[in-house]
Structure formats: C-alpha cells, structure tokens
Image: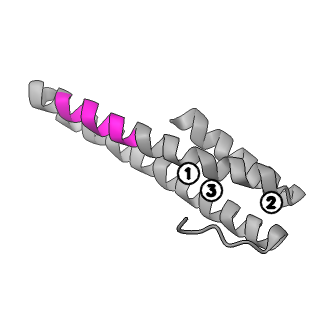
C-alpha cells in the first residue's frame, strides 16, 4: 500500500509539472487498488484483534497508518482529477 501510494504521489507531481493527462488518469485508476488494500487490512487486523486481544494496540496503529496512506492516495487522485480538467477540460470527479 505504501509503495503504490508513494508512486501515486510521484506520478501526480510529474503529471502536474508536465501537464500529462494520461499519467494523471493512471493515478486515478490506482485508487480502487488502495481501497481494496484498505479493506483487506481492516479485515485481517480485525481477525487478529478478535483472536488475540494483545494485538489490539498494534493493530490500531497499523490501521491509522493505512488510513493516512489512503488519504494521501485520495488527495493525489483529487489533484490528478484537477490536472485532467486543466489539460483537457473534462470533469471526471464522481464518475
């Protein structure tokens, strides 16, 4: 999740600097992957917390990190949606 999010941020910045619509579209296309990973993390950590309460504190810390990564990916996507609008004039938000 961290690797994908990091690459999304890098590609978002490159897309902004170079005004590359296709790169911005590719960033937006990666957001569902991050959402799936977030769901997977929540499911797995919930299972661990139920089976072993000693893991609750650590699991919550991991969930907080994952939430932050998801938010960074969301912000990268929002920026790329704006880039697409600036370059092409197409609004792709909420599609």
* CB contact under 8 Å: marks 3 and 2: no
- Residue 83: give x, y in percent of width and height: 75, 65
User: For the residue carrying disc 3, how many other residues have a C-alpha within 10 Å: few (<14), some (14-19), or many (20+)?
Assistant: many
**Which circle's residue, 1 or 2, is located before the other in the chain?**
2
Q: Which residues are magenta?
A: 38-47
Q: 20 above or below 42?
A: below
Q: Which residue is mark 1?
A: 73
Residue 45 painted magenta: yes
Query: According to the image, label 2 marks what residue?
Result: 16
Q: Regarding mark 2 in the picture, which secondary structure is present there?
A: helix
Magenta stretch holds residue 8:
no
Give the residue at x 50% y 46%: 32
Give coordinates of residue 26: x percent, y percent.
70, 47
Q: Which residue is mark 3?
A: 76
Q: Where residue 72 sits in the image (x, y, percent)?
A: 54, 53
Q: CA distance from mark 1 to mark 2?
A: 15 Å
* Helix, strand or loop at mark 1: helix
């Amino acid at each position: 999740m961290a690797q994908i999010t990091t690459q999304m941020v890098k590609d978002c910045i490159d897309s902004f600097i170079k005004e590359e619509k296709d790169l911005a579209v590719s960033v937006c296309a990666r957001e569902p992957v991050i959402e799936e990973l977030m769901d997977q993390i929540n499911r797995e950590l919930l299972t661990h917390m139920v089976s072993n309460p000693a893991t609750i504190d650590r699991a919550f810390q991991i969930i907080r990190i994952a939430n932050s990564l998801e938010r960074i990916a969301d912000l990268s996507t929002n920026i790329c949606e704006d880039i697409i609008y600036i370059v092409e004039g197409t609004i792709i938000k909420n599609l």
